[in-house]
Image (tube, grey):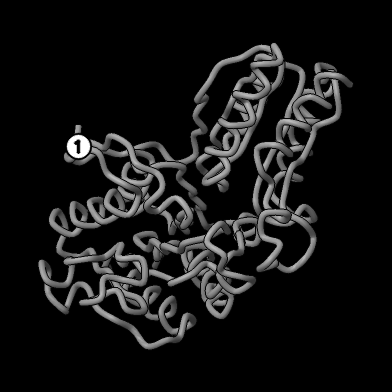
Amino acid sequence: MPKMNMLQAINNALDIAMAEDEKVLCFGEDVGVFGGVFRATSHLQEKYGRDRCFNTPLVEQGIIGFANGLAAQGSVPVAEIQFADYIFPAFDQIVNETAKFRYRSGDLFNVGGLTIRAPYGGGISGGHYHSQSPEAYFAHTPGLKVVMPRNPYQAKGLLLSAIRDPDPVVFFEPKRLYRASVGEVPEEDFQLPIGEAEVTKEGSDITVLGWGAQMEVIDRAVELAEKEGISCEVIDLRTILPWDEDTVAESVLKTGRLVITHEAPRTGGFAGEIAAVIQERCFLYLESPIERVTGLDTPFPLTLEKEYLPDHLKIFEAIKASVAF
């Protein structure tokens, strides 16, 4: 298999989807000739024309409103929000229109063909308007699916699934891994299941759970833990909504311990929802309190980015504390 970075894998997925179905359209700010600010849509306009890959005005609410209209009429729009931080002007369109379109029309109409791509997270010294992780806002909205891949292989397979999914999907891409994460990716068409977590490493002492860019951080923390004789089971949630309760619960019933990590702030973060459900399902099997290793309850800082991010050392300390409880 050829090696691709995450941007190349995303571009390849979009290329396959557009070649297969002429109803697939890509649009957003600067996605045309420029190929997007990160170049994820490079050469797609050149290949498929300006009718199918085109720039929009700098108005996120308009981008998603336009996408809702296209999807309602049978198109398969892939709308790009240039940074996940910019998605908030479109929040009303996503949570009140995209998510509820099928429900409020009694399934006479739906926007199930809509995929919203957005780069999220820190690690690029982008400050508070280019570093946020807003997945928890959308996890509270019935009618959406929320997907966050960890590497190029996952990005391609999950994006193709998202584009073909019968429900609207918000697809958050970890921007700090766009070029840093490189791996083998099949050139041919393939899909990965939405709504299923993946056990990336089996272990017996503790379960460590994350998604997106945190998976690379978890791997480094687990390497340190195993040098101390701690056997870690690692799970990539992959899909935030709907999330795979059964896979996580099955693991925690085996290990008796759970550490959850995400970049978003702690309060109201999705780790709290996971902790509540696992406590309900696994209470009598827990050997220690469920630990959360997250971003801080502050605006995302510029000069103190490293202090803000939940790094491998913080996760390692949480693993040790949980095992020693």
**Residue found 76% across the figure and 18% down from its top:** 256
Horizontal and vertical percent for residue 130?
55, 70
Instruction: Tell me if 83 is positioned left or right of 306 in this view.
Output: left
Mark 1 neighbour class, 10 Å CA radius: few under 14, some 14 to 19, many 20 or more: few
Quarter of the image with the N terminus is top left
Give the quadrant of residue 205. top right
Count of numbered tags: 1
Give the quadrant of residue 189. top left
**Residue found 58% across the figure and 75% down from its top:** 88
**Residue found 73% across the figure and 28% down from its top:** 258
Give the quadrant of residue 208. top right
Q: Amino acid at mark 1?
A: Pro
**Residue found 52% across the figure and 70% down from its top:** 94
Compare residues 75 and 190 and report the one nearer the observer. Answer: 190
Residue farthest toward the front in the current orientation of the protein: 303
Horizontal and vertical percent for residue 287?
84, 18
Compare residues 324 and 244 and report the one nearer the observer. Answer: 324
Compare residues 245 and 9 and report the one nearer the observer. Answer: 9
Instruction: Tell me if 47 is positioned left or right of 78 in this view.
Output: left
Horizontal and vertical percent for residue 80?
38, 69
In the picture shown, does residue 100 fall above or below 315? below
Instruction: Tell me if 94 is positioned left or right of 159 in this view.
Output: right
Name the element at disc 1. loop
Quarter of the image with the C terminus is top right
In the picture shown, does residue 27 fall above or below 9? below
Horizontal and vertical percent for residue 3?
25, 39
Q: Which residue is mark 1?
A: 2
